[in-house]
Image: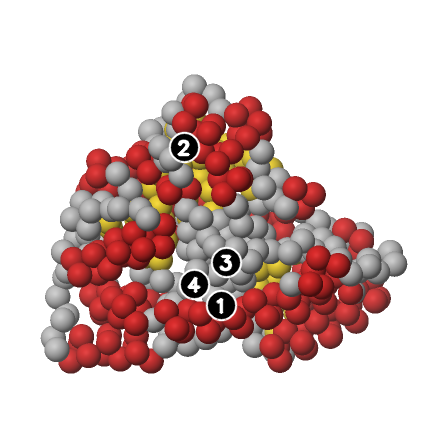
Amino acid sequence: MSNRFLSSTAKNLQPSGIRRFFDLAAGMEGVISLGVGEPDFVTSWKIREASILSLEEGYTSYTANPGILSLRKEISKYYRTKYSLSYDPNSEVLVTVGASQGIDLAIRAVVNPGEEVIVIRPSFVSYLPTIELAGGIPVPIETTAETDFRPTADAIRHAVTDRTKAVMICSPSNPTGTVLNQSSLQEIADVCIEKDLLVITDEIYAELSYDEAHVSIASLSKMRERTIVINGFSKGFAMTGWRLGFALGPDDILQAMLKIHQYTTMCASTTAQHGALEALRNGWEDVAHMRKHYQRRRNYIVRSFQEMGLSCHMPGGAFYAFPSIKSTGFSSEEFAEKLLHEEKVAVVPGNVFGPSGEGHIRCSYASSMEQLQEAVRRMEQFIARHSTQEPFLVDQKTMQT
């Protein structure tokens, strides 16, 4: 059929680079995937049981548009306890269909056509298209491994124009695992206050911070009123398939987001909301258990990459390592395709996260230790065949963690 009915926006939208490699790997047998960005843990039984019970009790109707009030109160309590941030559950908390919908709502609520949003790259693949779908103009700031993929205040300040509306950040980062500590966040905050900018902060990996406590930029002085916080249950609580997230922010912005949510989605899944309520009330031991395992896997895979000659900075959070593959002489795409076909290990080429991701690959360590060990064994064989340099010495800082 002709595509004459398609909008120009849909025609020009590029498919996800991550999806292309998922499709390639799906057609092969015996593949170990380090490409998937979701926990290998099953959602804890107490959360599933609470959801089942809600069905048995007949909670099958719409909820209030912004979500069940008891869940919004628990989300508000969560941020008050962890970050000393106060949000009114009646007007400043919105339950969304995953963090992805929260990001979309936030951008559509604040960005006018032609306005610019600064994005720190390498970045999650959906940020730029989501800005473009709202008629905005993404303005990427590239970062490198030499600075642990942290942006500088000067780089942000230099990117600001009279059309800049917001800065989008993600900490811990997908795909680099970099955590923006208080010092880095303060630099960003200072520029945003100076230039009167909004911040959209994706904190979906907040519970997967390993070396230091996660800091929300909204908790810094004078930032709450200019920050939209996006978070959810997918990563920390192993609830990716439940598609449940939430947004926090000033009343006027959250109410604008709620209007879009009302007309496009009505409300998040009732069953999932009951599960999320149980997660926030009684799921923290499971979060700690999974975090402990991810940290052990992180240490193993980063050390393994360095021992096989792939320079790799130590990710402070999320469940991704982002090693450099420049020593092989391959581009990111070439490396990922050859590795998949020769050793049946699926990784994501770093260039799909922006130009500064070129020369890297994203490897998820949200797989069992047995799978990680087998993937490392196969990658060692691959590197031994293709590396053009002597292996790097293992970084002592890495060895100590």
> What is the number of callouts on the image?
4
Where, by quadrant of the figure, is residue 389 drawn?
Answer: bottom right
Q: Name the residue under label 1.
A: 291
Residue 290, percent across and down? Answer: 47, 71
Q: Earlier in the sequence, mark 2 or mark 4?
A: 2
Residue in the image at 39% along x and 73% along y: 285
Are the residues at dot 3 and dot 4 in contact (C-beta closer than 8 Å)?
no
Q: Mark 2 points at which residue?
A: 166
Identity, as a three-letter code, of the amino acid under mark 2: Ala
Q: Which of marks 1 and 2 is nearer the N terminus?
A: 2
Q: Earlier in the sequence, mark 1 or mark 4?
A: 4
Q: In this view, does 47 lie above or below 309?
A: below
Identity, as a three-letter code, of the amino acid under mark 3: Ser
Distance Cα–Cα, label 3 vs label 2: 25 Å
Are the residues at dot 1 and dot 3 in contact (C-beta closer than 8 Å)?
no
Residue in the image at 70% along x and 71% along y: 376
Task: Tell me the element at label 1.
Answer: helix
Closest to the observer: 253 or 22? 253
Residue 379, percent across and down? Answer: 73, 69
Q: Name the residue under label 4.
A: 235
